[in-house]
């Protein structure tokens, strides 16, 4: 299978399955798993506790290797940015963290992804339970063609919340957390698709946090938005980090520089599938990177 | 993928900074020659020329702001700009000290001191060498050389101590010389400050190369 084919498949599978990812409820079979025994050699990234840790995480689409031995420790309640040139496996990595790739035919994971201390690819683990703990926000806002209220209530309802007062409370709290409440509180029954792009994206964030995940994955959450909406998302991320661990893929260097605490620079080359070239505190990566290739990338000289 | 315009802009501020540095070096030299020769015309030129130094500094600063606003510099590029912004400020202040020596010379009309500059010329030579070497270290991105420059500030401080002791001695023995010796003390003080500024520049070179901001030598004055 060629790399481009697998990418197309990945995108298609993603679009099909985004609704399940949001609800955290699905019965699809998981990808084949090989647990590597090698210990983690990840960058010691923070004094804060680590929330997510990958150990020699490699990922294949059929025979195509997309990720090669990723060892990363993601600190809790911090924003970690993933940057790197197109095709280096950033989105693949993100999707491997909540088993989104289970949907991609031929996708195969090696190594471990530890959420707290639990391997999310462990044999006894329910992928839906993983996705309830690790939510996701996509590049293009993708609200359901339902009302604003029903979008936010979707996940909690899937998880069995039936009481109207409880749902009301969750919807209000989630919309407030997503900095959208004041704009939509008088129009909760209006179609979500009538909102602006930036509002739709904040609605998707409200929808993701309604089921109270521990980690939020964001795949270029602002790349389809105008500058004002982009800044709102970035400010919102700063508030959300009080409560959630955020991992964000971005192509926007300035966004990574101003909106994240830690930055991982992914790369790939002729010899090696996607790998972590440098990982460290964002300030250090953007003012004094240790590696020449990191510097060339963030200063716009390559990639 | 080279960023041609950006690279040119970065080069231009660094070239401008070196030009400013040579203007300042020249001003220090001229101020001491004017003092040594009681050359009032020369001293006046130093004072007037300081305006050119100030103007040049602002031009470079504007260029730096333009680059920050338009090119989103990061990493080494960003450190170059921050270093240049600091260094041109130090250079401009060094120029003010040279101007100060020019003004002192103008105050010293009729005072007898010509062959009695003592260690002042040596202070000036050392301070100028520190200035030139710090900029060489900048051009060569040599943090070790820059760090070594900072230690030389102690030599200038020691010379200042000597000038001070000598001046006090003269004042005690010949009260008629109090005004002259005070003026020479002021001159020495300006030179001591110039050397301090040279260590600031050297510190910025270390920052540029390593990304670390360290105070490498704390002047005793």
Image: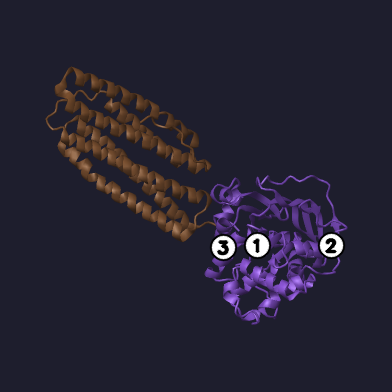
Reading the image, the residue beneath label 2 is A126
Helix, strand or loop under label 2: loop
Toward the viewer: A129 or A95? A129
Q: Colour of chain B?
A: brown
Real-space Cα separation, disc 2 to disc 3, in angstroms: 33 Å
- Position of A159 with respect to B78 (left or right) is right
Reading the image, the residue beneath label 3 is A235
Helix, strand or loop under label 3: helix
Q: Is residue A67 above or below residue A223?
A: above
| Chain shown in purple | A
In percent of width and height, residue A267 lies at 67, 55
Q: Residue at x 20, y 19 (%)?
A: B172
In percent of width and height, residue A252 lies at 58, 62
Q: Nearer the viewer, mark 1 or mark 2?
A: 2
Q: Is residue A18 visible?
A: no
Residue density around tag 1, few if under 14, some if 14–19, many if 20 or more, within 10 Å: few
Please report contact status of discs 1 and 3: CB closer than 8 Å, yes or no. Answer: no
Reading the image, the residue beneath label 1 is A86
Q: Residue at x 70, y 75 (%)?
A: A151
Q: Is residue A146 above or below residue B171?
A: below
Please tell me which of labels 2 and 3 falls first in the chain. Answer: 2
Please tell me which of labels 1 and 2 falls first in the chain. Answer: 1
Residue density around tag 2, few if under 14, some if 14–19, many if 20 or more, within 10 Å: some
Q: Is residue B105 visible?
A: yes
The chain identifier of the residue carrying mark 3 reads A
């Amino acid at each position: 299978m060629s790399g481009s084919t697998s990418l197309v498949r990945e995108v298609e599978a993603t679009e099909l399955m985004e609704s399940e990812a949001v609800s955290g409820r699905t019965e699809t079979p998981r990808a084949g798993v090989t647990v590597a025994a090698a210990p983690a050699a990840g960058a010691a990234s923070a004094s804060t506790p680590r929330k997510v840790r990958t150990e020699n995480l490699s990922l294949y689409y059929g025979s195509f290797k997309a990720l090669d031995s990723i060892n990363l420790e993601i600190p809790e309640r911090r924003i970690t940015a993933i940057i790197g040139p197109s095709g280096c496996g950033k989105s693949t990595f993100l999707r491997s963290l909540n088993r989104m790739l289970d949907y991609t035919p031929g996708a195969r994971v090696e190594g471990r992804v530890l959420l707290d201390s639990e391997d999310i690819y462990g044999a006894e683990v329910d992928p839906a339970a993983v996705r309830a703990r690790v939510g996701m926000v996509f590049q293009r806002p993708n609200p359901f063609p339902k009302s604003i209220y029903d979008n936010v209530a979707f996940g909690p309802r899937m998880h069995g919340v039936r009481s109207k007062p409880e749902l009301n409370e969750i919807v209000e709290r989630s919309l407030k957390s997503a900095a959208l409440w004041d704009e939509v509180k008088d129009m909760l029954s209006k179609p979500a698709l009538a909102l602006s792009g930036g509002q739709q994206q904040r609605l998707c964030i409200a929808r993701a946090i309604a089921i109270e995940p521990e980690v939020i994955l964001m795949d270029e959450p602002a790349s389809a938005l105008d500058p004002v909406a982009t800044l709102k998302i970035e400010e919102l991320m700063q508030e959300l980090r009080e409560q959630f661990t955020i991992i964000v893929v971005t192509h926007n260097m300035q966004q990574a520089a101003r909106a994240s605490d830690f930055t991982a620079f992914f790369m790939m080359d002729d010899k090696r599938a996607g790998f972590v070239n440098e990982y460290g505190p964002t300030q250090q990566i953007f003012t004094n990177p240790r590696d020449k290739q990191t510097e060339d990338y963030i200063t716009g000289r390559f990639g | 993928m080279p960023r041609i315009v950006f690279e040119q802009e970065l080069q231009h501020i660094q070239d401008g900074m070196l030009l400013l540095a040579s203007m300042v070096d020249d001003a220090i030299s001229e101020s001491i020659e004017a003092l040594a020769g009681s050359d009032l015309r020369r001293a006046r030129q130093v004072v007037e020329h300081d305006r050119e130094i100030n103007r040049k500094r602002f031009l470079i600063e504007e260029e730096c702001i333009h680059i920050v606003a338009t090119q989103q510099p990061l990493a080494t590029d960003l450190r170059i700009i921050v270093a240049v912004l600091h260094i041109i400020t130090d250079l401009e202040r060094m120029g003010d000290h040279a101007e100060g020596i020019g003004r002192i010379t103008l105050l010293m009309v009729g005072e007898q001191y010509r062959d009695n500059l003592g260690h002042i010329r040596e202070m000036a030579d050392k301070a100028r060498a520190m200035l030139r070497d710090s900029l060489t270290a900048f051009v060569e991105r040599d943090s070790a050389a820059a760090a070594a420059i900072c230690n030389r500030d102690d030599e200038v401080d020691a010379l200042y101590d000597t000038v001070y002791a000598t001046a006090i001695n003269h004042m005690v023995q010949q009260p008629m010389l109090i005004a002259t010796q005070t003026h020479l003390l002021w001159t020495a003080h300006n030179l001591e400050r110039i050397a301090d500024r040279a260590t600031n520049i050297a510190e910025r070179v270390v920052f540029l190369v390593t990304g670390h901001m360290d105070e490498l030598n704390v002047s005793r004055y």
